[in-house]
Image (cartoon, grey):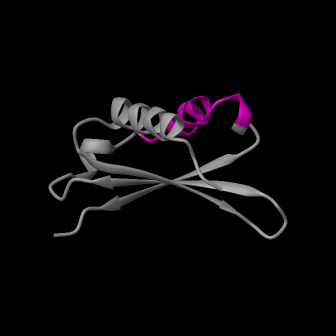
Amino acid sequence: MEVSREIADAVDRVVRERIGRKVHEVSIDAVRASDGEVTIFVTVVMEREATAADFAGKFFGLTGRVRDALGEDMRDVFPVIRPVEAHA
């Protein structure tokens, strides 16, 4: 399953609005399991110099915002948000 550019941009926008400038990159992947269930993986790559203080508490409520960005057609899809550190 592929996520449209429009939805990917909307998810990117809400993540950056919520977390701030310490976000290096946001990627979104949709995976369909053998039972037909779709899971959206949102990977948030934090800047190398980001500290826990830079994003403490900013992931709270982010799932709801991402679900809103996914839109009505994907209302039954649960997004998994994964923060990771940028590599050199």
Extreme residue in the right direction: 35
Q: Position of residue 24 (x, y in %)?
A: 25, 50
Residue 17, percent from left and from top: 35, 29
Q: Residue at x 44, y 42 (%)?
A: 59
- Between 40 and 2, the residue placed more toward the observer is 2
Location of residue 58 with respect to 25 vertically, above or below? above
Q: Residue at x 50, y 34 (%)?
A: 6
Residue 2, position in %: x, y?
60, 52
Q: Does residue 64 belong to the magenta stretch?
A: yes
Residue 50 in the figure: left or right of residue 69: left
Left or right, 64 with respect to 54, comes to right
Question: For residue 45, which quarter of the picture?
Answer: bottom left
Q: Which quadrant is home to the C terminus?
A: bottom left
Please check the rendered image and state whether residue 47 is part of the magenta-colored stretch, yes or no: no
Q: Nearer the viewer, residue 56 or 2?
A: 2
At x 78%, y 58%, the residue is 37
Query: How far from the left and from the top, in percent, is residue 69?
Result: 55, 31
Q: Residue at x 55, y 42 (%)?
A: 4
Q: Can you say whether 12 is above or below 48 in the image?
A: above
Magenta extent: 59-73
Q: Main secondary structure of the magenta part?
A: helix
Query: Would you identify the image quadrant in which residue 55 lies?
Result: top left
